[in-house]
Image (cartoon, grey):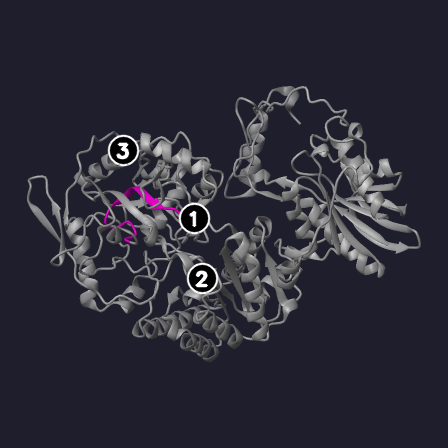
């Protein structure tokens, strides 16, 4: 069984500043990191491999040459292989074109179980995972919190909802996007890190994936960005700090009493 | 040259909060610091935003004969910024601007106000966010432009655990941390200082400019006369140390103020040397079978020059057990290690990209040759992973504090007894035997961790009863006497403050303590500055 995990290199948003005039990200000196949710996806892929026995895990990313770094992180954690999708023609892709490109690679890998982080912290769309499932015609589970069991061609899994959890049974092949609650990602040993740093990583271009120039990158991206702006700050959090809960509640009641009538709870 | 000539200064009125009641109600945080020592009251709180305002405040207090304490981030753990029996605090927290990044031919430097936190400086350097700095000269503006274009990264390499600490405090305390193994303490990085003296006068000086000569510095008085600051030569430890003033003939005036814990003046501006940052940093944690193996590895490492080590840290098996319990209970974001039982060593490597493979290879072979289980390692070469390792390391003192906090809920008055002593490399094994023997004989519970590469371990004793607390203190004193006798330092990075004054009395003979007091008296004859701190 081929298990694939889609990972992404993202700017460390802890360092992100917005240019006050252009409203664009200032990327100067900002470190590129593995999208935090993807570490949980890698871990779950490795656990599934161990549970299934005869399976391999391949990490896939689309990006420039330097995004190889996140593939090496996956390899250090224990992934068997990694593939970089890199081509100038991929540049400017929106979530549609990105998921289409990734789907082509996943198809070429013959991946049957595909794991992704629930979203990337730079775009926060949470669209790429589900879109891969749509492109490939696979079943999909978003917000995966637990893989309960694997039987035959089915997985019984638990997913996070707004107000609870849901257990679902999904047929394989499937795409699952994961949340932090799923697991605690393992760490690399010294030997694994050393080997991962030097393992050859194949690079696939649009030609390798038999994709036309019109369906990928900017030309293949129907999304149109009309405007980017920083939302106006509408309110300010106020911390109530007191010696006791009683005092805090009293203060809170007083504060709420000051609100206009329609805003009162 | 040993003459110190104060500069002319235009004093500016300083924002102040007057009245013990108002301060207790609205500024209660200023009554204590991280040591949890708490003053009953504080009469005046000054919040200067410039050196001129700070000087105004200090001169006013001097003229009113009111005692005063200078504070910054108040992250110190020896009570040096808790205003006990003090009339006023001058907080430099609002003097928090990075003034300039420049280049002086030798290398880049940062000129900062004391209230800039270490993490703020580190972040701004990392992001190269150094343009339009408020104190930059034209030449410094050009240097800052060049800094942004540099292919290499530059950083401030000293990394005390508490990165919210203010630079002024870190300088006043000669702070250090894990990377002192390679980079030394704050002292090594201070190029120049501006200081407001206890009488409100301002002095500015660069390293190399003013040195003690003929047993003294000479401070020029307003009437042109000279007052003597006597500098006798002390027997200093051969290790890293924060023991007040490292007095010796020929000492640099910068070194008199670095580590002076706010007793000689208020440091209002600092120029720090920056270093080229290694292109890549890797961290390796390895869990061992027993403590002897750790000591052997550290001793052997000293003979290796092929490993570009920034830091070598130690966690004994009790520390690892604390962390494992946190991990199992999911109380901290700690990774699932393959092995938790046994002590651990952490190595940080820093080098060029193309050197890291060789360095990792050499370390792996080294560990392999010493029988370390290859599966019981954790290695990271990226920023997220290194952050996770830092979190892991910092979780030890946090877990210790949480444990003693639980004990103190049951028995009020309990606190941990934490050592901060460094010994010369030849004494490390002996010191460890002494610690273990003392702990075994007294039956006290402890956690040992810290900067083993610098032979500087923190033994944290966790008493559960007041009787155990008394025994822990006795044990600490007996260790300190041994450490001082063998050329070590009883305080290596936390400072003396109020809590460790008895340690200084163990370190130094009465005549040496008197020499420290004479320096202090020469600069603060009225004894108004930081009363009760240091000596």
- The part of the chain drawn in magenta is B260-276
Residue at (17, 34) in percent of width and height: B8
Dot 2 falls on a residue whose secondary structure is: loop
| B70 left or right, relative to A102 | left
Question: Quarter of the image holding residue B457?
Answer: bottom left
Residue B368 point in image, percent of width and height: 59, 72
The residue singled out by tag 3 in the image is: B53
Q: CA distance from mark 2 to mark 1?
A: 41 Å
> Of A28 and B198, which appears nearest the observer?
A28
Question: Quarter of the image holding residue A207?
Answer: top right
Quarter of the rendering occupied by the C terminus of chain B:
bottom left
Answer yes or no: are tags 2 and 3 on the same subunit.
Answer: yes
Query: For the residues carrying marks 3 and 1, which lies nearer the camera in this image?
Result: 1
| B389 left or right, relative to A1 | left
Residue at (41, 65) in percent of width and height: B454
The circle drawn on residue B415 is 2
């Amino acid at each position: 069984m081929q298990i694939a995990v889609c990972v992404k290199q993202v700017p460390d948003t802890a360092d992100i500043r917005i240019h006050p005039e252009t409203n664009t990200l200032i990327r100067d000196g900002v470190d590129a990191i593995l999208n935090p949710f993807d570490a949980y996806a890698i871990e779950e892929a490795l656990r599934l491999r161990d549970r299934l026995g005869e399976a391999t895990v391949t990490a896939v990313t689309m990006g420039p040459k330097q995004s190889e770094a996140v593939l090496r992180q996956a390899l250090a954690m224990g992934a068997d292989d990694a593939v970089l999708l890199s081509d100038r023609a991929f540049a400017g892709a929106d979530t549609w074109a990105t998921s289409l490109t990734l789907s082509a690679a996943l198809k070429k890998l013959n991946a049957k179980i595909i794991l992704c982080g629930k979203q990337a912290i730079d775009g926060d769309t949470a669209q790429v995972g589900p879109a891969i499932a749509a492109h490939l015609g696979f079943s999909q589970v978003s917000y995966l919190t637990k893989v309960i069991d694997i039987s035959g061609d089915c997985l019984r899994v638990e997913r996070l909802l707004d107000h609870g959890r849901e257990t679902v049974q999904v047929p394989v092949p499937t795409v699952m996007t994961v949340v932090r609650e799923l697991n605690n990602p393992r760490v690399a040993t010294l030997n694994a890190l050393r080997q991962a740093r030097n393992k050859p990583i194949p690079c696939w271009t649009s030609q390798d994936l038999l994709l036309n120039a019109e369906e990928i990158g900017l030309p293949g991206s129907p999304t149109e960005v009309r405007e980017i702006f920083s939302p106006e700050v509408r309110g300010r959090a106020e911390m109530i700090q007191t010696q006791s809960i009683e005092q805090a509640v009293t203060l809170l009641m007083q504060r709420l009493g000051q609100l206009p009538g329609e805003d009162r709870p | 040259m040993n003459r110190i000539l104060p500069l002319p200064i235009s004093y500016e009125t300083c924002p102040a909060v007057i009245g013990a009641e108002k301060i207790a109600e609205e500024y209660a945080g200023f009554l204590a610091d991280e040591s949890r020592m708490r003053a009953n009251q504080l009469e005046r709180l000054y919040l200067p935003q410039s050196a001129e305002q700070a000087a105004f405040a200090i001169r006013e207090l001097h003229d009113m004969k009111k005692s005063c304490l200078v504070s910054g981030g108040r992250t110190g753990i020896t009570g040096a910024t808790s205003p006990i029996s003090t009339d006023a605090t001058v907080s430099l927290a609002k003097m928090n601007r990075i003034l300039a990044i420049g280049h002086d031919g030798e290398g880049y430097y940062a000129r900062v106000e004391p209230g800039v936190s270490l993490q703020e400086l580190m972040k701004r350097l990392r992001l190269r966010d150094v343009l339009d700095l408020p104190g930059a000269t034209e030449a410094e503006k050009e240097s800052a432009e060049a800094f942004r274009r540099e292919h290499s990264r530059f950083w401030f390499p000293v990394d005390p655990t508490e990165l919210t600490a203010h630079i002024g405090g870190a300088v006043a305390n000669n702070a250090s941390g894990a990377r002192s193994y390679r980079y030394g303490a704050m002292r090594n990085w201070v190029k120049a200082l501006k200081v407001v003296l206890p009488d409100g006068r301002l002095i500015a000086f660069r390293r190399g400019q003013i040195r003690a000569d003929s047993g003294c510095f000479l401070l020029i008085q307003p009437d042109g006369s000279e007052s003597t600051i006597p500098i006798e030569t002390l027997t200093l430890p051969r290790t890293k140390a924060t023991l007040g003033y490292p007095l010796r003939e020929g000492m640099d005036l910068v070194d008199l103020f670095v580590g002076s814990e706010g007793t000689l003046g208020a440091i209002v501006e600092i120029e720090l040397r920056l270093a080229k940052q290694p292109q890549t940093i890797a961290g390796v944690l390895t869990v061992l079978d027993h403590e002897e193996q750790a000591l052997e590895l550290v001793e052997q490492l000293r003979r290796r020059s092929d490993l570009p080590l920034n830091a070598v840290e130690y966690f004994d098996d009790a520390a690892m057990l604390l962390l494992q319990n946190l991990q199992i209970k999911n109380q901290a974001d700690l990774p699932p290690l393959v092995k938790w039982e046994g002590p651990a060593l952490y190595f940080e490597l820093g080098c060029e990209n193309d050197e890291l493979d060789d360095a990792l290879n050499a370390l792996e072979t080294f560990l392999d040759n010493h029988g370390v289980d290859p599966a019981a390692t954790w290695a990271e070469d990226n920023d997220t992973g290194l952050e996770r390792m830092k979190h892991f390391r910092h979780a030890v003192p946090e877990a210790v504090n949480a444990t003693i906090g639980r004990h103190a809920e049951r028995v009020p008055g309990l606190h941990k007894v934490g050592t901060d002593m460094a010994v010369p490399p030849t004494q490390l094994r002996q010191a460890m035997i002494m610690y273990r023997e003392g702990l075994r004989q007294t039956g006290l519970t402890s956690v040992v961790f810290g900067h083993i590469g610098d032979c500087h371990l923190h033994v944290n004793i966790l008493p559960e009863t007041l009787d155990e607390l008394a025994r822990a203190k006795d044990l600490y004193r007996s260790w300190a006497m041994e450490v001082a006798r063998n050329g070590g330092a009883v305080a290596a990075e936390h400072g003396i403050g109020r809590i460790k004054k008895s340690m200084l009395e163990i370190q130094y003979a009465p005549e040496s303590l008197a020499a420290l007091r004479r320096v202090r008296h020469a600069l603060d004859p009225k004894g108004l500055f930081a009363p009760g701190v240091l000596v």
